[in-house]
Image (tube, rainbow, N blue to C red):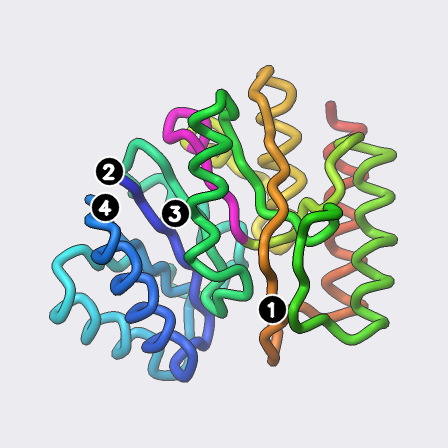
Amino acid sequence: MLSVVVPCYNEELRLPRTIEHIERYLDGRQLDHELILVDDGSADGTRRVMEAAAKQHSSVRIEVLPHNRGKGRALAVGVEAAKGDEILVSDADLSTPIEELDKLQAALSNGAGVAIASRALRRSRVEVSQPIYRVLMGKGFNLIVQAVLLPGIWDTQCGFKLFRADVAHRVFENLSTDGFAYDPEVLYRARRQGVKIAEVPVVWRNSAPTKVSPVRSSFDMLRHVIRLRFRG
């Protein structure tokens, strides 16, 4: 079985389309699956959308954080609840289309324990780009991550990653990073455990608006990356 974990914070408007898109695709492939929607303390109608989806689709499960903790914490809660043999974590905006799942599953079939979608590889196709300042900040952050934690990985922050279940449960357990810097932490943990990480070129389309603050979130991620490196 495949588990798909989607963290949701104030996603009332985007979530209905996302749920239907994921369900239609996975049902079309006749994949046994569960869709775990994690409400990260939303203040809008996100929870109502989730409950309506759970009534319509037997595969939909809901996890709830009582207040907003951050993307990393929401994913850790969803992964802990997941029962699948493979666990996909995906952003609610589907900037990486769910149809790119095939490419990541192929990487796991070829021996990887983690397959991560990448916008930075030559065969990647960015159809709708972020604003240039966000592109430059992302490239700068990734250069730091490569220098400090994960040499050879060109895009840690794309929100579409597939894990073998045993790997996912290990690397998300006791996650120390609640926010957007969860990506380097789980990949760093996986690499230290000797897990093969495959970076896979994908189609990617920027979706606005975003929850990432260009300054505050960037400094927070940088702080966590440096802390991880010197904590060992």
- Label 1 or label 2, whichever lies nearer to me, is 1
Q: What's the residue at 49%, 69% (across, down)? A: 93
Q: Crowding at label 3, few (<14), some or many (≥20) Cα neighbours within 10 Å?
A: many
Q: Secondary structure at mark 1?
A: strand
Q: Which mark is residue 205?
A: 1
On-image quarter of the N terminus: top left
Residue 54 falls in which quadrant of the image?
bottom left
Give, as a three-letter code, the residue at label 4: Leu
Per the rendered image, the range of residues in magenta is 160-168
Rendered position, 202 above or below 55? above
- Label 2 or label 3, whichever lies nearer to me, is 2
Q: Which residue does the numbered mark 2 point to in the structure image?
A: 1
Q: Which residue does the numbered mark 4 point to in the structure image?
A: 31
Distance from the alpha carbon under mark 2 to that under mark 3: 18 Å
Q: Crowding at label 1, few (<14), some or many (≥20) Cα neighbours within 10 Å?
A: some
Q: Secondary structure at mark 4?
A: loop
Mark 3 and mark 1 residues within 8 Å of each other at the beta carbon: no
Mark 2 and mark 3 residues within 8 Å of each other at the beta carbon: no
Q: Which mark is residue 102?
A: none
Q: Residue 157 at x, y = what percent?
A: 66, 51
Distance from the alpha carbon under mark 1 to that under mark 4: 25 Å
Residue that lies at the very extreme toward the top in this rendered image: 194
Distance from the alpha carbon under mark 3 to that under mark 4: 23 Å
First in sequence: mark 1 or mark 4? 4
In-image side of 78 versus 115 (left or right): left
Q: Residue 35 at x, y = what percent?
A: 28, 55
In-image side of 93 versus 229 (left or right): left
Residue 162 counted in the magenta span: yes
Q: Crowding at label 2, few (<14), some or many (≥20) Cα neighbours within 10 Å?
A: few
On-image quarter of the C terminus: top right
